[in-house]
Image (spheres, rainbow, N blue to C red):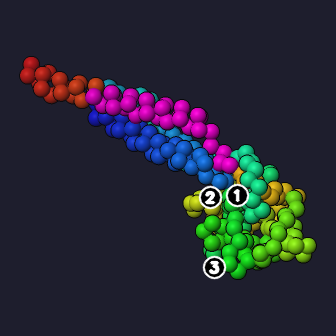
């Protein structure tokens, strides 16, 4: 009975963590370049249960298998869906989107991050930066200085300002996107070095929307709530059974 209470509790706890993931997805549905997460619910490692068989005279105790039992469930892992979101046209010259694979590289001192959020701006020194002040890197890894003129960016990332070439937007890729770790604000960090993406397509005047399907996430939240509610009902039922076992059966 106590094992049943614990199993119900762990299931409810897993649903709470799952709901946090879903709520974060919904909260960032309108965030530029956001990638949704999803959690994987799994059971605790199963344990083999055995029973003591009735031994015969002059024989050792024999253990017979009963079956396997799991003590509950947990959120095993949280994965990120790296699929591309739809592109939305803005008309702003500093808004950039990537059609297909790849990430922009941005730097703040020694911190190197990667992002799909191309809602950039030009600072007072003429450098292309993120909204948080991270410097956007070119293909050579150095910051891009675009000045204050009229900027045009070709699909291959080449920058032209008032007829003068100003470098090329760096687009990078990874052998496996599972190497990327979310750092917030649409940015990712990686312990491994990326490689320049050949054939990257940069779209000026557009932004990549999040890849969150709000309706799907709302349905998932309702399912999560129902599962949590079921866990509550199971605990109440087991508590009532324990109450009878202790306070009523014990009187007989």
Q: Is residue 65 in view?
A: no
Q: Mark 1 points at which residue?
A: 116
Q: Which residue is drawn at 27% across and 28% down?
A: 236
Q: Distance between the residues labelled 3 and 2?
A: 18 Å
Q: Which residue is drawn at 59% across and 46% down?
A: 29
Quadrant for residue 228, please give it: top left
Quadrant for residue 186, please give it: bottom right
Sequence-first disc among 3 and 2 = 3
Q: Could you tell whether 228 is left or right of 212 in the image?
A: left
What is the x, y in percent for residue 52?
34, 31
What is the x, y in percent for residue 146?
79, 74
Most prominent secondary structure in the magenta stretch? helix
Q: Residue 109 carries which label?
A: 3
* Depth order, front residue of 6/201: 201
Quadrant into which the C terminus falls: top left
The residue carrying pointer 1 sits among few (fewer than 14), some (14 to 19) or many (20 or more) residues within 10 Å by Cα, namely many
Q: Does the magenta stretch include residue 227?
A: yes
Q: What element carries label 2?
A: loop
* Depth order, front residue of 135/4: 135
Quadrant into which the N terminus falls: top left
Q: Name the residue under label 2.
A: 186
The residue carrying pointer 2 sits among few (fewer than 14), some (14 to 19) or many (20 or more) residues within 10 Å by Cα, namely some
* Depth order, front residue of 103/1: 103
Q: Could you tell whether 138 is left or right of 250 in the image?
A: right
Q: Could you tell whether 224 is left or right of 200 in the image?
A: left
In the rendered image, the residue lying farthest to the top is: 252
Q: Does the magenta stretch include residue 232?
A: yes
Residue bounds of the magenta highlight? 209-236
**Residue 36, above or below 107:** above
């Amino acid at each position: 009975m106590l094992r049943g209470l614990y199993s119900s509790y762990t299931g409810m706890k897993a649903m709470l963590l799952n709901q946090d993931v879903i709520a974060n997805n919904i909260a960032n549905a309108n965030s530029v370049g956001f990638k949704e997460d999803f959690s994987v619910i799994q059971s605790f490692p199963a344990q083999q249960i055995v029973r003591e068989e009735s031994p015969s005279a002059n024989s050792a105790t024999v253990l017979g298998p009963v079956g396997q039992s799991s003590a509950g469930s947990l959120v095993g892992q949280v994965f990120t869906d790296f699929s591309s979101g739809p592109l939305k046209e803005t008309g702003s010259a500093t808004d950039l989107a990537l059609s297909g694979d790849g990430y922009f590289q941005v730097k703040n001192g020694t911190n190197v991050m990667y992002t799909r959020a191309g809602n950039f701006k030009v600072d007072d020194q003429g450098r292309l930066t993120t909204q948080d002040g991270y410097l956007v890197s070119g293909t050579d890894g150095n910051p891009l200085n675009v000045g204050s003129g009229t900027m045009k960016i070709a699909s291959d990332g080449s920058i032209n300002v008032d007829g003068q070439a100003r470098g090329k937007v760096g687009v990078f890729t990874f052998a496996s996107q599972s190497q990327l770790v979310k750092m917030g604000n649409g940015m990712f960090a990686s312990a491994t070095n990326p490689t320049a993406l050949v054939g990257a397509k940069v779209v000026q005047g557009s932004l990549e929307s999040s890849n969150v399907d709000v309706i799907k996430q709302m349905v998932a939240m309702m399912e999560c709530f129902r599962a949590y509610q079921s866990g509550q009902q199971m605990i109440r039922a087991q508590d009532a059974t324990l109450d009878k076992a202790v306070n009523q059966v014990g009187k007989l």
